[in-house]
Amino acid sequence: MTDLISMTIAEARNGLANKSFTSLELTDAHLAAIEAARALNAFVLETPDKARAMARAIDAKIAKGEGGPLAGIPLGIKDLFATKDVRTTACSKILGNFVPPYESTVTSQLWRDGAVMLGKLNNDEFAMGSSNETSCFGPVVNPWRREGSNTSLVPGGSSGGSASAVAALLCMGATATDTGGSIRQPAAFTATVGVKPTYGRCSRWGIVAFASSLDQAGPIARTVRDAAILMRSMAGHDPKDTTSVDRAVPDYEAAIGKSVKGMKIGIPKEYRLDGMPAEVEKLWTEGAAWLKAAGAELVDISLPHTKYALPAYYIVAPAEASSNLARYDGVRYGLRVPGRSIGEMYENTRAEGFGDEVRRRVMIGTYVLSAGYYDAYYLRAQKVRTLIKKDFEDCFAKGVNAILTPATPSAAFGVGEKGGADPVEMYLNDIFTVTVNMAGLPGIAVPAGKDAQGLPLGLQLIGRPFDEETLFSLGEVVEQAAGRFTPERWW
């Protein structure tokens, strides 16, 4: 069983093609692993019957030589993606036992290509959080632990269930979403690979919205190659999503192993923060040296508006969230808490249905969009966003192919350790990742080393719009130099 679950997607794909094992055997091995790892709280809904039925159907197709690019590969799906006839809650009480009668575009493309669904993965409520502690199903536990300690650590957020499940070998890959770092930060905390594609590369249709101008779906996988394989199936134009870009999807896997000789890699001085741990700084220097050794050229660059990214993000994202979440009112679907009038029913439903963090962000968002404050906050934040985007455009115009930064300011922290009294402490986790969403650029987080306590740390590569291939080529250089590492099993 361990052999079947410890393979990469690429290895499993070859094994299935060679008939070394069946998709049903692969699926059963993962279902057993999920059952044994419930202490991690990574899955909020297991779908064993559906998984086995999908696996049997795929085995029949493989036997006829009709399997797709992901034929028989078992995946986990973040509970933000609508799955037809399977409960989808965004990990919020307000959606109750909502069962969508439709399938999100991204997941429908995965099933089209032959993937198997193991179940729905835990996430921060409505994707609002950096530690996966705001879910109504309780926090997810990181499979990694500090050396010599039994303290439960967070897996990062909001895609904590996705990262934890992939790291703990519960699924071969997972869907995730990234609004301000929600793919890359959990990937860095769990030694997995996370890709935030260019805005518009993957359809947002059928994904529960948080902040529509920032949200983007992407994969979390165990290797750069696996992430490339998943990304090819997830990406593509969708007429149902007006922000989806109509351009051909390249073969991302073909970029793996390509030479990076002569590529210019920007090192932004603004990412050197006061108080940044020495080990993060050291890792960043090491990563730059690996790329240089592979033939890339390092150049110092400046992204002067970086310091405004986090405050601007925490105006734009809550503003869009307050608008998107207005639809949850207890009238048509989800939770309904009765009241003496329709207004009271709205109030009661939203007060009981939304958790503290979601309520906080809806209130901030409503405030910054209100009459008299719109120009002072929201409009100004959008202007700052334009300047942030221009910083990147200026660097790329000078021939920079990609930008190397740390993925997170620290390794994973303990459950309940941050953000209790001061939510800003939690928001600071996104300091290296939000600029990418504000500018609509692609980013990849790759495991690059460990801290003094044996916890994984990641590096981030930021690319030009729709140039994910360069990120896969560079990411693989980092992966080869750093090696792969997995957590010791304790659950």
Image (tube, rainbow, N blue to C red):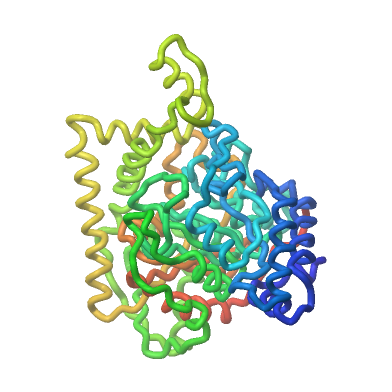
The structure residue drawn at horizontal position 60% and vertical position 64%, both measured from the top left corner, is 191
In this rendered view, identify the residue nearer to me: 230 or 277. Answer: 230
Residue furthest to the right in view is 1
Give the total number of marks visible in the rendering: 0
Considering the image in quadrants, where does the N terminus appear? bottom right
Q: In this view, does 135 lie to the left or right of 345?
A: right
Residue 388 appears in view: yes
Q: In this view, does 487 lie to the left or right of 162?
A: right
In this rendered view, identify the residue nearer to me: 22 or 450. Answer: 22
The structure residue drawn at horizontal position 32% and vertical position 68%, both measured from the top left corner, is 269
Q: In this view, does 151 lie to the left or right of 329?
A: right
The answer to whether 93 is drawn above or below residue 147 in the figure is above
Residue 168 appears in view: no
**Residue 116 place in picture, x, y as percent:** 66, 61
Q: Is residue 485 left or right of residue 257?
A: right
Instruction: Residue 468: name its quadrant.
Output: bottom left
**Residue 141 place in picture, x, y as percent:** 66, 48
The structure residue drawn at horizontal position 79% and vertical position 62%, both measured from the top left corner, is 29
**Residue 336 place in picture, x, y as percent:** 51, 23
